[in-house]
Amino acid sequence: MKTKNSAFWAIAIISLLQLTACGQTSNNKKMDNNLKLNELNNEEKRVIINKGTEMPYTGKYYKNKDKGTYVCRQCNTPLYTSADKFDSHCGWPSFDDEIKGAVERVLDSDGRRTEIICAKCKGHLGHVFEGEGFTKKDTRHCVNSISLEFIPAK
């Protein structure tokens, strides 16, 4: 009986960690109050405002290979180009660079990960990881598709 109980709790904890992997407390940085923001639905608010995460392999952009620019869903600020996107097989869109000045890095409250936010509206994008060896730049911005909009190249 003890083994079944342990297995249950292990699965429960792993499931909870997956659902809250990007959940964080808000940072102290302020956005410009005059900034025009797009209206967000409840799921977008959960991720962008409340620092949640979407389930892996469910976002609309993780497999996107089209050429263009990824902008912030909340304020339309250009964040990433398709030239910097790569497939890291993590279930979320991955980029090894951002558009200069568009993304800020903030240490998570747990001190273990680095959150990435839109520099303009402070909306949650995901997390950045270094030293994994996926690309020559050795950086992976792991971004929630729901935090982005894609503008195809003309």
Image (tube, rainbow, N blue to C red):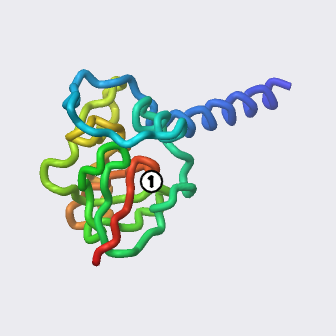
Q: What amino acid is at disc 1?
A: Ser
| Residue in front for this viewpoint, 57 or 81 | 81
Q: Position of residue 41 (x, y in %)?
A: 51, 40
Q: Position of residue 2 (x, y in %)?
A: 80, 24
| Residue in front for this viewpoint, 153 or 8 | 153
Q: Secondary structure at mark 1?
A: helix
Q: Quadrant of the C terminus?
A: bottom left
Question: For residue 3, what is the image quadrant?
Answer: top right
**Extreme right residue here?**
1
Q: Is residue 125 above or below residue 81?
A: above
Q: Position of residue 118 (x, y in %)?
A: 26, 42
Q: How many marks?
A: 1
Residue name at image x 19 percent, y 31 percent = 32
Q: Would you say 38 lies left or right of 59 here?
A: left
Residue name at image x 19 percent, y 48 percent = 102
Q: Would you say 54 lies left or right of 116 here?
A: right
Tell me the residue that label 1 is attached to: 145
Crowd rating for badge 1 (residues with CA inside 10 Å; few <14, some 14–19, many 20+) = many
| Residue in front for this viewpoint, 78 or 16 | 78
